[in-house]
Amino acid sequence: MKRIFITAFTALVLFSCQNEQTESSDSAATAAAHRGCATQEVLEAQLKEDPTLAIRMNEIEAFTNNRLLTNRLVNGKVEIPVVVNVLYKTAAENISDAQIQSQIDVLNADFNALNSDYNSVPALFSGVKANVGITFVLEKINRKSTTKTSWGTRDAMKKTKQGGLDPTSPTTKLNLWACTIGGGILGYAQFPGGSSATDGVVIDSKYFGVSGSANYPYNLGRTGTHEVGHWMNLRHIWGDASCGSDLVSDTPTHNTANYGVPAYPHYSTCTGTPVEMTMNYMDYTDDRGMYMFSLGQKSRMAAIFASGGPRAAFGI
């Protein structure tokens, strides 16, 4: 199991800037071969454009670590109002109200341990599987017809002046954008600490919810669960590095991302050769292969909603 020890240096290394992903122009009409989440790449681009973001995120890490160490997390209930912004050129992209509601239903199931596959968690991890206890309420759907075939990952869909839709009250509402992203990307999220003008989660319309245009093997709404996990400050389980850290103490160290549905047990070759938690929502497995958060991830998410946390305005 991983132990959390954060210094200013390691935090700065964690948030170091690398390459920047540009907007995609291809239509991405076919389903993605592997899960592609651009959250880390988007973060690196944002850090390059705004060096003060690293400072804010380091402060959030320090706040989160302090909450975890002092065990002063408020035991309450978080109910998140959701605004869904649909950007479409084709009828398939103009996903139905029912498909949108199906995504909200998946979030409520997955974040409250009500998913039908929750009891499939292996005995090895049964002691750390978590009911996060956060609920989501669909408040509004905004729709806009566009001429764009794909939006890329530079937040154009979040800006009315660039043909998209500005977020609605992003400090108190979770904004989701449903559109064609392109480049094989299923979705991406903005971590706490970023600009409120671009805060929220983007999900490709082909992987939004469980009905309508949702494409196998990403047709169970778990792209939404994965990306909302990022929005709540969760890292990829492999830490976006070989044998990296996701800053959670009870998730095993992974070599790298896992794809498809790995046979259990799947062993890591990292120190201690632990069995990897491939069924965790923050891995890259197919939708049917991911069905749990850990208690450590729950505590990390709860910290951002506590008084003084970066999403405290949502209440806890």
Image (cartoon, rainbow, N blue to C red):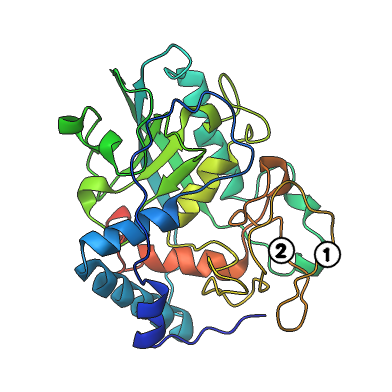
Specify few, some or many for label 2: CA neighbours under 10 Å numbering under 14, 14-19, or 20 or more.
many
**Relative to 78, does residue 61 appear above or below in the rendering?**
below
Q: Tell me which residue sits at (64%, 35%) in the image.
A: 220
Quadrant where the C terminus is found in the figure: bottom left
Q: CA distance from mark 2 to mark 1?
A: 12 Å
What residue is pinned by disc 2?
277
SS state under label 1: helix
Q: Can residue 211 be seen at all in this image of the molecule? A: yes
Residue at x 24% of width, y 51% of height: 171
Task: Tell me residue 189's x, y (percent).
Answer: 40, 49
**Residue 204: which disc?**
none
Where residue 162 sits, quadrant-wise, is top left
**Which class describes the residues within 10 Å of circle 1: few (<14), some (14-19), or many (20+)?**
few
As rendered, which of 307 and 8 lies closer to the eye?
8
Furthest-left residue in this view? 161
Residue 312 coordinates in the image, percent (x, y): 30, 61
Q: Which residue lies under the disc numbered 1? A: 123
Please report the residue visible at 25 percent of the width from the left and 30 percent of the height from the top.
164
Total number of numbered discs in the rendering:
2
Amino acid residing under circle 1: Ala
Pick the residue in front: 14 or 208.
Answer: 14
Q: Quadrant of residue 276?
A: bottom right
Left or right of 112: which side holds 77?
left
Secondary structure of the residue carrying tag 2 is loop
Q: Amino acid at mark 2?
A: Met
